[in-house]
Image: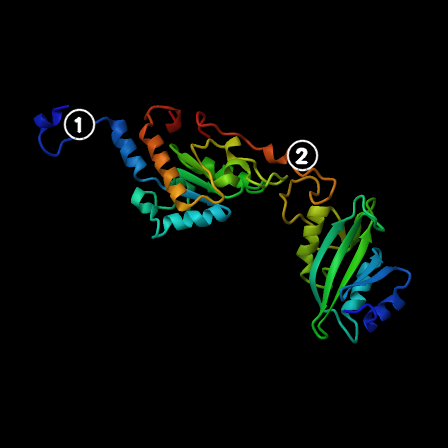
Amino acid sequence: MGLEKLLGDGILATRVSALVNWARQNALWPMPFGTACCAIEMMATLSSRFDLSRFGAEVIRFSPRQADLMIVSGRISIKMMPVLLKIWEQMPEPKWCISMGACASSGGVFDTYTLIQGVDQFIPVDVYIPGCPPRPENLIDGIRKIQEIVSKERLWDAKHGN
Amino acid sequence: MNANHPVVARFRERFAADVLSVEEFRGQTVISVKAPRAVEMLKSLRDDAECPFDMLTDLTAADYLRLDAPERFAVVYQLLSMLRNERLRVKAYVSEARPEIGSVSSLWGNANWLEREVWDLYGIRFLGHPDPRRILMPDDYEGHPLRKDYPLKGRGERSHFPKYTAEEAP
C-alpha cells in the first residue's frame, strides 16, 4: 500500500480481519472428543513424531470454554451424543469442527441402533477426514484445511455471534 | 467337567422335578433347568460340600426366538469351583410371557452388574435385585435391543437430538 513508507519502521497497515484470522488460524486450541481408535491417532499426531505444534494446534484444551476447534474422533453412541452436544454448546464462538474418521462422519461399519450415523446431522462440521482410522498425516491435512477456512472468515457474520 | 461327576448326580437327585436335561459336549457339562427354583439350585451348587462352585465367571442370556428350545429365553450361569478346578454351565429357561427369574446377586456379588446388563439388553427381570437399573443403554431408553426381534437399526433413537447449524449459534 505504501503507507508503511510514510509511517516508518514498526508500523504495519492491514485489515483487522486479516490480522485476527492470521492469529486464529495459527493458534487453534482443539477440544479433543476422542471416543475410539481415532483418538489414538490424534494422540500420535500431537506427540513428538508428527508434532502438531508445527501448525500451532497443540494446545489441547480439556475445557470446552477455552477451545475453538472440536475434533470428534471416534464413534458416538446415543448415550454420548447429549454429552457431545453439551460440550459443543459450551464452546465459545467462533468455533470449528473436524469429524475425524469413518465413524464420526457416517457411523462407519456400525449401522446399529446405538450409533449416531454421522455427527454432522446435529452439529455443523467444517472438515471431514476419511479413514479408519486416518493416519496422523490425514489429521494434519484436516487441520490445514481448517486453517484455510479460518483465514477466509469475516469478522461480522453469524459465526461470531453477530 | 463330566456329566457323570458326583456333584451333577447329587444335583439331579435333589432337583429332579426341575431339571430339564443334562448334556455333555466336549467335556463341558450343561444343566438345563426350569427358572422358578433357580436361586435355590444355584445356592446348592455354590454351597456343595465336595465341589463348591464359589465363583460366578459369567452370567448372560440367550434369545431362542424361532429356535427349538423349551422357552424363548435362557439365563446362562457359568460356574467355577476354585477348590476342584471344575466348571459347570447352568441354563435356566424363562418364558416370553413372564421374563423373570430370581436374582443371584446375594450369592455372588458380581452378579449385580451382570444381571443389570441382562435386564438392559434382554428385558429379563431379576426379582430381588438390589439395584435394577439399566447399565449400558441410556436411562430413558425404551426396549431391549439384544432381543432377536428388535430392529438392528433401532426405532429412531439415533436421530432424536437437537440440531445445530453454523448460522444459528447455540
Which image quarter is the N terminus of chain A in? top left
* Residue A74 badge: none
Instruction: Report the residue marked by disc 2.
Output: B155
Residue B170 percent coordinates (x, y):
46, 30
Q: Is residue B123 left or right of residue A156?
A: right
User: Residue flagged by tag 2: what amino acid is it?
Assistant: Arg
Q: Quadrant of residue A125?
A: top left
User: Residue flagged by tag 1: what amino acid is it?
Assistant: Ala
Scheme of colours in the image: rainbow
Cα–Cα gap, marks 2 and 1: 59 Å
- Identify which residue is drawn at 68% across, 52% down: B116
Instruction: Report the residue marked by disc 1.
Output: A13
- Identify which residue is drawn at 81% across, 45% down: B96
- Packing grade of label 1 (10 A; few <14, some 14-19, many >=20) is few
Q: Is residue B58 left or right of residue B93?
A: left
Q: Check chain identity for marks 2 and 1: say if they share one.
A: no
Name the one closer to the observer, A162 or A21.
A21
Residue A9 percent coordinates (x, y):
10, 33
In the rendered structure, the residue with mark 1 lies on which chain? A
In the rendered structure, the residue with mark 2 lies on which chain? B
Is any atom of residue B103 visible in this view? no
Element under label 1?
A: loop
Name the one closer to the observer, B145 or B123.
B145
Q: Quadrant of residue B76?
A: bottom right
Is any atom of residue A73 visible in this view? yes
